[in-house]
Image (tube, grey):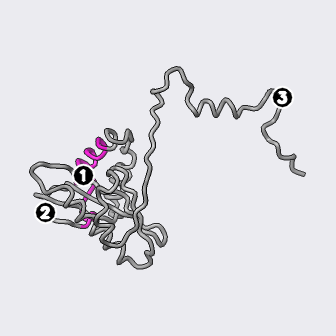
Amino acid sequence: MEILDLRHFSSADLRPLLEDEIALWARDLSWDYGTSAEMILRYMDAKILPGYAAIERGSIFGYSFFVYESSKGVIGDLFVRDSARGPDRHEVEERLLTHVIETLQQSPGIHRVEAQLLAHHTGEVARPFLQQGFSRHPRVFMNFEMASIPNQQSPRARCRRSSKSAPGRSRNTNPPPR
């Protein structure tokens, strides 16, 4: 297995892995990751997405990318395909994260590094961060199944209904301009 710069590859190289990731987000988080995946693929083809790819027998089976936001580095994603015949997924995740963390720590002008890897269970990929001195903060992922409340209006519909003006009244409470 090799860890290589993500910018050496095209969207065609990453697409099969992203399709697996889209399925994971849908299954585990009820989240459509398709739009994000398409953006990642566009950035791949433009060669402007910094990160690393895990390669086995010429095929990408894991990746992580990051972005620069002013003086902050943000780890955008980490995904490794689970395979019975390949390297251990957790070891590959740790290697990818270590590469990303070290790159961000050595990047001029970066004073802070953040990560919120939503597709990972709390603590699952904490070790590389903790080894580098990161502080850890709890996160809460909340989900509300709208279909679980039969015969109820959605909160959005209730908000629209309650924000309507009374007949004959204007919603604008500011005095007219002079």
For mark 2, what is the residue? 1
Q: 151 or 44, which lies in front? A: 151
Picture disc at residue 12: 1
Residue kind at label 3, given as amino acid type? Gly
Label 1 SS: helix
Q: 21 or 117, which lies in front? A: 117
For mark 3, what is the residue? 168
**From the viewer's perspective, is residue 17 above or below residue 164?**
below
Label 3 SS: loop
Q: Which residues are magenta?
A: 5-24
State the image coordinates of residue 149 (x, y, percent, origin top left).
49, 25
Tell whether label 3 touches label 2 (CB within 8 Å): no
Residue drawn at 33 percent across, 68 percent down: 130
State the image coordinates of residue 125 (x, y, percent, origin top left).
29, 59
Lower sequence index among marks 2 and 3: 2
Mark nearest the camera among 2 and 1 is 2
Lower sequence index among marks 2 and 1: 2
Residue drawn at 32 percent across, 51 percent down: 121
